[in-house]
Image (cartoon, rainbow, N blue to C red):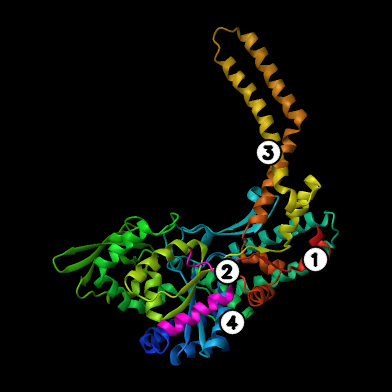
Amino acid sequence: MDPFSYADLEVLVDDCCNFYHGQLEGRDGAFSKDRRDLAAWVHKFHEGCGTLTGNVKESIERLNESPCVFLMTAHQPNLFAYAGVLRKAVLNHVLAGKIANILKVPVVSFFGVADQDFTDDRWVRCATLPDVERRGGMLELRSNLPEKTLLCKVEKPSKKVLDGWRKEVEDWLKRNLGIVARGPVKIDSGSAGKVLSGNLDSFWSLVEAAHSRAENYSDFTGFILSKIVNEVWNYPTLFARFSECQQIFRRQFETLLFRFDEYSELVRNAVSSVGCLGNGVCDDEFLTVPFWLHCDCGGKARLTAEREGDSFSGVGRCLKCEKEYDVNLGSQEKADISKIADKISARSIVMPLVFFEGLGICSYVGGQGGREYLLQAKYVAEKMFQRFPVAVVWRPHDVYHGVGQVAASMTFEELSGKHLVSDYDPILRSLKENVECVQRETDQLEAEKKRLLGDRNMKREDKIDKLKRLSGQQADIRRLADYTVLVRRLGLLENIGIVMDLHPCIIDYAVNIGLRVTAEQWAGFLSQSGSLSSDMKLISELDHVLPDLGQN
């Protein structure tokens, strides 16, 4: 049974309230110092981002002074993050309102920006938009980043790169509007284009505002998240950089070092006994101290725990510049990381352990990609008798008529004359069989050609004559089957499937629905249906200009 899957919002709310009553109520004093320290880093982030709104200030005051229920989520600052990243903030916001109404206690939502992660992950470098006519069925906006470098140590993209991305998105919009305009459902592409282009202009103003304030790559991408959540949606959600705020958990890290033998054995057991799918921590994680050490070059070092007598140290090498480290961590009886506290960040399995214990988290909204780490962290926390809050992963599929999705649907109708949903799979399968049949026949003739080339007993003139005849037969097979057209059609059909399954970046929502309306529809769906397991049908701008779109 997956402990992070909830089918119903009300069950999640009840579990959060029960966890608060059983584990947190009346214990705010135990978390007050770490919360106040966090508030300082939160203030710094929002001041730099320009999102120190009235709602944000009020949440910071609650964090500083009054008892409150604390909800958390976190994510890497991805390039134009896909919708699931921002959907976490919406779920936290809706959850906060419901919990506050029941408990009559102020609720604060926190979003941790994992800017200390490496640049190597695809989604910090790449953002996708549905594009049926492009190779792979999508447009990819890409950022060239150095490898094995902390996101907070990379320069923000240049204005030239930023303008290039905008031009790519504008071309994508124009091209897909053109496909929609020639479809069976008639559309005034100029009128629709004006609305969608206006949405893009509004979004890009936000992007440029974030860019102007950012000092590095992670600030650029993280500031976009905050400006959407705090300015456009006017949520009181608090943001902070992990690279800064994790130093407040010195006590929690030192406790893990003090209990390292126990922690290490539990990590080993978590890897072997928790049913993960290969995305959790590696098999030798139990040998590693519970934090990364940040290197001056912008990389990180993984430190292996070593002991000699009473001394305890972490030994390792920077993954980027290969500098060797031998860090004195005091003794296991009295661990001391005071000299490196501002240069460390929690390893994946440890982030929940230090944040949840230090801040008194009541609920955590996780992501699909971090589910295995969360399972392993839950195992370790519970065995160490640490509080592990209610955790949920919410990853529905949004269904809406965006310009890329409608272009794919109309391309399917052009190719097949059939309705996409009901007939896609059998038509794709039939076309694949036709292409494979032609390929088999031509491959058999190609094998015969290779055999002839290796025949040393045949006269050269006879060999050339037979090779020409075989090549002619191959050409006839391809011509009669219209093979080039078949392959093109197959490529488009495969792209259509990719478009329909794609979880696109937030630009797709900003252009086709609008940022504010997207949040309203997500929150409305949660409040009205309460379902955390079903997909969501969203209303787009094209639904307004194409009233018959839902019938096609």
- Please state the horizontal and vertical placement of residue 379, each as a whole percent of the image: 37, 66
The disc placed on residue 210 is none
Q: Does the magenta stretch include residue 419?
A: no
Compare marks 3 and 4 and give the one earlier in the sequence: 4
The disc placed on residue 235 is 4
**Residue bearing mark 1:** 192
> Mark 2 falls on what kind of element?
loop
The disc placed on residue 7 is 2
CA distance separating discs 3 and 4: 49 Å
Residue at the spot x=44%, y=81% of the render?
41
The part of the image, by quadrant, that contains residue 253 is bottom left
CA distance separating discs 1 and 4: 30 Å
Label tally? 4
Q: Main secondary structure of the magenta part?
A: helix
Instruction: Choose mark 3 or mark 4, whichever is in front.
Output: 3
The part of the image, by quadrant, that contains residue 161 is bottom right
Compare marks 3 and 1 and give the one earlier in the sequence: 1
The disc placed on residue 432 is 3
